Image (spheres, rainbow, N blue to C red):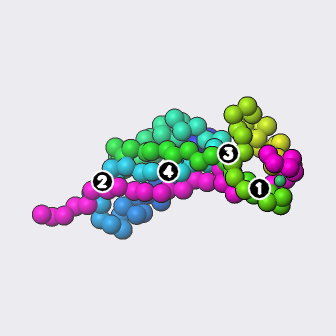
Amino acid sequence: MHEYSVAMGVYEVVLNVALKNNAARVISVDLELGELTHINPVQLSFCFEAVAKGSLLERTDLNVIKVAPEIRCKCGYEGSINTEQQTFYDLILNLRCPKCGNPAPELTSGREINVRDIKMEVDGNA
Ligand SMILES: [Zn+2]
């Protein structure tokens, strides 16, 4: 399952940061998720919860921030593409510049899986 391996990857990244900072627990994680990754945020949260069980990340809120796809084309167009009337596979297979119709624009966003922010409680001994 794709979501499971992504959850595992996010877990490892966040756990590493938490350990380096002597965190007592991780409160929340903001995760940028490109719309073209084809990852279901609900399933991702579910997997993340399962992976994090019994760790510093046990009750961590995973906030998924969806990132819309954007392209750059040799005609000069740079920006978003209309995704509303297209299925996921249409988008991937028939990616086109909305301005000139070039079928092979460069995808500049929409595929990212980035941990953007981590909030944690640090054990202060105080
Ligand atoms: Zn173009």
Establish whether ligand 1 lies closer than 8 Å to the Cβ of label 1: yes
Q: Residue at x 44, y 41 (%)?
A: 50
Name the N-terminal-most of marks 1 and 2.
2
Mark 1 and mark 3 lie on one chain; the one further toward the N terminus is 3
The residue type indicated by label 3 comes to Leu
Residue 80 visible in this rendered orientation of the protein: yes
Of callouts 2 and 3, the N-terminal one: 2
Type of amino acid at the residue the image marks with label 4? Leu
Check disc 1 and report the residue beneath it: 77
**Residue on which the image places disc 3:** 36
Residue 115 belongs to the span the image colors magenta? yes
Position of the C terminus, as image quadrant, is: bottom left
Task: Give the residue number, with chain letter if any, for mark 4.
Answer: 31
Element carrying mark 2:
strand
Give the CA separation, mark 1 to mark 3.
20 Å
Residue type, label 2: Arg
Give the residues drawn in magenta, as a range: 98-126
Whether label 4 lies within 8 Å of ligand 1 gets the answer no
Mark 4, other Cα within 10 Å: few <14 / some 14–19 / many ≥20:
many
Which type of secondary structure does the marked residue at label 3 adopt? helix
Q: CA distance from mark 1 to mark 2?
A: 45 Å
Q: Residue 83 lies in what quarter of the image? A: top right
Viewer can see residue 8 = no
Are the two marked residues, 4 and 2, in contact with CB atoms closer than 8 angstroms?
no
Query: What is the distance, in whole Å, between disc 3 and disc 4 at their CAs?
Result: 15 Å
Residue drawn at (58%, 37%) of the image: 40
**Residue type pointed to by label 1:** Tyr
- Mark identifier at residue 25: 2
